[in-house]
Image: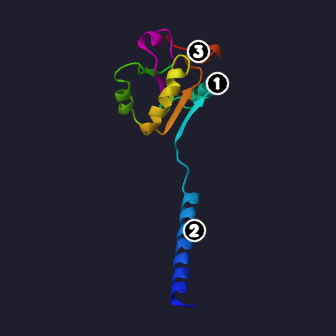
């Protein structure tokens, strides 16, 4: 074998070894803790029960203040989606906490998921059907 073939074989060997370790690294890398998804009102109620007493669990109502006054989930914090300060308000939140987000029908909260993702939130659950679905399922509210 001549020198150029030996150099090519050595380079190919190095490349294969590097590729092997890269694939191994990706395979062994833990899955991201990121969970940004839509869940049913029943799953939301189960989440609320599971996280009861957890200071790192936040229920975020993104309806308007008048909508909020008609009834909301226990311990919900209001952050109006239509407010000029909505994005700034999101930026102020701890991105490492667990959030259950809802609106009236699931439309606003569904649209907000992309924003939560862009801002680097790790765990956000959007309640499908919003407060309307919660009410239809017969779950309790506060006024």
* Residue 55, visible in the rendered structure: no
* Residue 142, visible in the rendered structure: yes
Is 133 magenta? The answer is: no
Q: Residue 20, which numbered label?
A: 2
User: Which x, y percent locates residue 30?
Assistant: 55, 53
> Which residue carries the number 3 mark?
132
Which of marks 2 and 1 precedes in the sequence? Answer: 2
Which one is closest to the eye, mark 2 or mark 3? 2
User: Which x, y percent locates residue 31?
Assistant: 56, 50
Measured in 3D between alpha carbons, the distance from the residue under mark 2 to the one under mark 3, in whole angstroms, is: 52 Å
Answer yes or no: do the residues labelled 1 and 3 have beta carbons within 8 Å? no
Above/below status of 39 relative to 9: above
Q: Residue 42, which numbered label?
A: 1
Front residue (pair 97, 12): 12
Measured in 3D between alpha carbons, the distance from the residue under mark 1 to the one under mark 3, in whole angstroms, is: 12 Å
Residue at image position (63%, 28%) is 43
Which of marks 3 and 1 precedes in the sequence? Answer: 1
């Amino acid at each position: 074998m001549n020198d150029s073939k030996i150099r090519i074989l050595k380079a190919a060997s190095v490349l294969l070894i590097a590729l092997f370790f890269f694939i191994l690294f990706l395979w062994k890398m833990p899955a991201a803790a990121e969970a940004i998804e839509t869940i049913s009102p029943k799953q939301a109620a189960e989440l609320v029960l599971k996280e009861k007493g957890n200071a790192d669990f936040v229920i975020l109502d993104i309806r308007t203040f008048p909508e909020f006054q008609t009834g909301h989930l226990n311990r919900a914090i209001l952050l109006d989606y239509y407010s000029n300060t909505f994005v700034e308000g999101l930026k102020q939140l701890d991105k490492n906490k667990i959030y259950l987000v809802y609106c009236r029908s699931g439309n606003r909260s569904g649209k907000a998921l992309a924003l939560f993702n862009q801002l680097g939130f790790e765990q956000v659950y959007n309640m499908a059907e919003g407060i309307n679905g919660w009410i239809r399922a017969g779950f309790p509210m506060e006024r």
